[in-house]
Amino acid sequence: MDILRPTLIRIGGRVYRKNLIQEQAYQHEEEEDFCAGPSDCADEPCDAFVVEETGKGFQCKVDVPSPLYKYIIGKKGETKKRLETETRTSISIPKPGVEGEIVITGQHRSGVISARTRIDVLLDSFRKKQPFTHFLSFALNQPAIQEKFLQFKEEVLEKCSKDHGVSSSLFQNPAKLHLTLGTLVLLNEQEIQKACDLLERCKEDFVDQIAGGKPLTVEVAGVEYMNDDPAMTDVLYAKVHMKDGSDRLQVIADQLVERFVASGLMLKEWDRVKLHATVMNTLFRKDPSAEERNYTMTGKSSFKERESFNGQNILKLFENFYFGEVQLDSVRLSQRFSSDASGYYATSGQLTFS
């Protein structure tokens, strides 16, 4: 990192610079510390959070999912001790696995604010490194679509099985066919409920008006590949479009992601959602339960571990393959690595169009 141009992080409308102070690894991740920028509130009253006055000084409470406690504690408690020493505060953290509030107390308001600010930035950094737990999806696993998908799989294996890397292990589970709008890291029930509540507000604010209270009729037709070279394909997907030729599906998808990004529940990855239904993925070769992962997700990439396949003949022979027509009547908050009774992902919440 260039020390003259440190990474800037925006939280709650404020800008902070991130300073890497230690190269020592902590559970495969760098331990980081942060310093508030010149426009912050480290030494003055701050309206971004509530600081209460008590009989012994001041305190501030922070809602933090239990899986993130370890990043505030640090190796052998070093991060917590350093925060307390440098801000002259005491930081109380619930026991591991117990959901609750982290409480910061101190004799000086400025110290409490400084500790809270640094904890917020620390948590924001490590949250971005967590694997996603949920995603917003449209289910495409209706029986007619599944039947056509299985026909597609059978014909591809019949006509293209001799092409490099093509095998039955590449194909999506038909019960899990879907469109992904965006991924989320939801680490406790409170965060899941927050996402469900936001879905309901989106329904009231714009989805009902765009959808007209009716399911969206969508056609799934044609295939395309993700990367630049069809001879080295990792992801092959089916294309989707509104049967009436409108852009209502795209508008709903884009506005949903925009609202979730604005709420802090989702990271912005693209200017607009790329609506696609993965039908073949080299991730499935080693792990049939693997989820598709957006290319810009943080963390270690698995692409180097993939064995690509030659998709040139598939693209030529099945360029306009018709998977069918489907009525999309809901957006689901789907749980990663899960299945419901139908074989689709378990649903933590949903927004219905009717």
Image (cartoon, grey):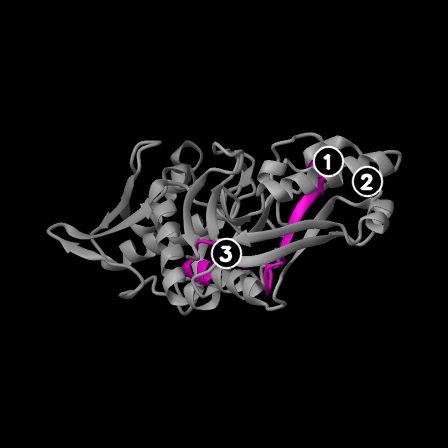
Give how far apart the Cα atoms at labels 2 and 1 are: 9 Å
Question: Which element is circle 3 on?
Answer: strand
User: Residue under circle 1?
Assistant: 170
Tell me the amino acid under the disc marked 1. Answer: Leu
Q: Is residue 295 above or below residue 347?
A: below
- Report the quarter where the C terminus lies: bottom left
Tell me the amino acid under the disc marked 3. Answer: Lys
Tell me the amino acid under the disc marked 2. Answer: Phe
Question: Which element is circle 2 on?
Answer: loop
- Residue displayed at 70% across by 54% down: 221
Q: Give whichever of discs 3 and 2 has the lower sequence position.
A: 3
Magenta stretch in the rendered image: 259-283
- Residue displayed at 60% across by 32% down: 289
- Report the quarter where the N terminus lies: bottom right
Looking at the image, which is closer to me, 203 or 86?
Answer: 203
Does the residue at mark 2 contact the one at mark 1 (Cβ under 8 Å)? yes
Q: Which dot, 3 or 2, sits closer to the camera?
A: 2
Q: Which mark is residue 309?
A: 2
Q: Is residue 285 above or below residue 248?
A: above
User: Residue under circle 3?
Assistant: 18
The reply to whether the magenta stretch includes residue 217 is no
